[in-house]
Image: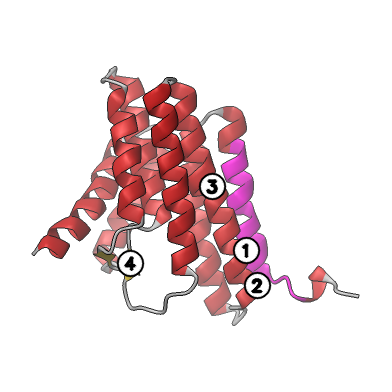
Amino acid sequence: MFSIRKIITISDYVTVINIVLGMLGILFHDFRFIYASVVFDALDGFVARKTNTVSEFGAELDSICDVVSFGVAPAYLTYYYFEGNLSLIASLIFLIGGALRLARFGILDVKHFVGLPIPAAALVLCVVSQMILEYNITSNLASITAIIAGFLMVSDIQYPKYPQKISMGIFAVSLLLSLFGIVEPLAFCAIGYVLYGIIKFKG
């Protein structure tokens, strides 16, 4: 009899925390759970490499968790906070783009990410949405962001897999600040990453 206990590893438990946080983000309508999901999404790969537990099962589990935490959760929150036909369509485009992005990622073996990674897309959509709510900006901006992010995820634009240590340090600090409601530094990092790929691709 097949027993999942024989194949699940410590890194897979870290991955499961990712999907739990994504679900909590949906239930409590709170972007901060998605920000926290990004932390555990990065941590599971680190743990897998350090404990030599990288596996096909772990890769499949990671994609499933990502589609919930970085696809379903941001799409749902976008519609929840900015109800309307445009918001609904934008949320669906974002979700479909994220699912296609993850499916393609599973069959590629390249040095760079092809298309905007779904965690980055989720961060951009969440920080823009949160800033709209905080600064009373037009809600259509959230829908526009969701649509652009959805198409960027299925684009051929290449994004770096491993940014420089300084950039990672700045990103880590901004991610930590976002958990305490200070989202502006994370917005700068997320939007900057998106634009970096676009500018480099055109250049």
Is the image coloured rainbow, by chain, by secondary structure, or in one colour?
secondary structure
Specify whether 29 is left or right of 116.
Answer: right
Q: Residues within 10 Å of mark 1 (few under 14, many from 20)?
A: some
Q: Which callout, 2 or 4, points at the residue further toward the start of the chain?
A: 2
Q: Amino acid at mark 3?
A: Ser
Residue 54, image x, y percentages: 58, 78
Q: Which residue is mark 1?
A: 61
**For residue 57, which numbered disc appears in the image?**
2
Q: Which callout, 2 or 3, points at the residue further toward the start of the chain?
A: 2
Question: Where does the C terminus fall, quadrant-wise?
Answer: bottom left
Which residue is rendered at x = 33% and y = 40% of the image? 147
Residue 9, image x, y percentages: 69, 72
Q: Which residue is mark 3?
A: 69
Is 14 covered by the magenta stretch?
yes
Distance from Cα at disc 2 to Cα at disc 3: 18 Å
Q: Which residue is mark 4?
A: 114
The reply to whether discs 1 and 3 touch (Cβ–Cβ < 8 Å) is: no
Q: Nearer the viewer, residue 153 or 61?
A: 153
Which residue is rendered at x = 32% and y = 46% of the image? 149
Is 60 covered by the magenta stretch?
no
Is residue 136 placed above or below 20 in the rendered structure?
above
Mark in the foreground, 4 or 1: 4
The reply to whether discs 2 and 3 touch (Cβ–Cβ < 8 Å) is: no
Q: Amino acid at mark 2?
A: Phe
Q: Residues within 10 Å of mark 4 (few under 14, many from 20)?
A: many
Where, by quadrant of the figure, is residue 135 drawn? top left
- Magenta-highlighted residues: 7-24
Q: Amino acid at mark 1?
A: Leu
